[in-house]
Image (cartoon, rainbow, N blue to C red):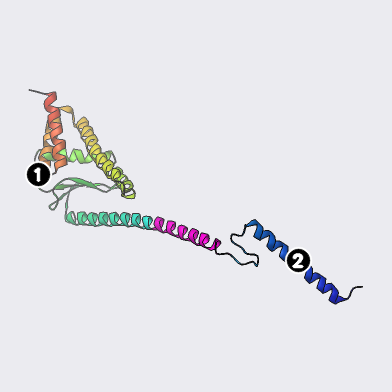
Amino acid sequence: RMPKQYQADRIQAGTEKVQQTVTHMVTGALSGGGISGNGEVGSELIPNVANGTDLATNTWGIAEFLGLVWLLGVVSIMVYSVISYIKLRRKVLCSMQVENNIYRADDISTAFVVGVIRPKIYIPSALQGDNLPYVLEHEKTHIKQWDPLKKILAYTITTIHWFNPFAWVAFNFFCKDMEMACDEETIARIGMEKKQEYAMALFDLAQETKSEDAVGEGLKLVAGLMRENPE
């Protein structure tokens, strides 16, 4: 039997030889670029790792910044919308109910619908005479066609895409198309023989409220009527 000291020496020598072989193989595989023979990390590898870390940090920083800008834009539009809605509710706070879901208010200049589940029609107190029935029919058509809900959904989509100018252009065209569809449906319900009175009622209301869009729609209806009835 070999002495214990001799066995320990042989084991230690074998371990050192294996370590030297592994170190030599790693050094040869890296071709001298990164890990030296003594197992230390070379300077050639450190800049690459550092640059990769910086690049990843910069990339995530830009994405986070753009996300923050988008979020601030959405929050700003939502805050503005809530403030506008609160101001509108204050204007109709002292409104007087006329019948069912129709209310008169002193501090408003045009008729509109508020609400989706239980919509209410608000009309100016100054709106009287023969134009009133046509204006009410117009607003009732908006309710029947679920236009308040459609407008809310369209506005929500536009808010999400607030950074895209084409989204606002599309929303503007959507609102105009919705009004035109409402006019066509209203005229179909009240009868073509009352188209002239309806057009003039819309035109008079637009003049009173100084709404350029409503004036334009009223003029289009009047012009169309004149083409159909040149006399």
- Mark earlier in primary sequence (2, 1): 2
Is residue 10 rendered magenta in the image?
A: no
Judge by depth and name the residue closer to the eye, 104 or 168: 168
Q: Quadrant of residue 141?
A: top left
Residue drawn at 11 percent across, 35 percent down: 200
Which numbered tag is attached to residue 17? 2
The image quadrant where one finds the C terminus is: top left
- Find disc 1 in the rendering and name its residue: 208
Task: Report the span colored magenta.
Answer: 42-64
Q: Quadrant of residue 37?
A: bottom right
- Name the magenta segment's main secondary structure: helix
Residue drawn at 88 percent across, 76 percent down: 3
Residue 217 location (% of width, % of height): 16, 36
Residue 31 location (% of width, % of height): 62, 57
Structural crowding at the residue carrying mark 1, measured as other residues with C-alpha within 10 Å and reported as few (<14), some (14–19) or many (≥20): some
The image quadrant where one finds the N terminus is: bottom right
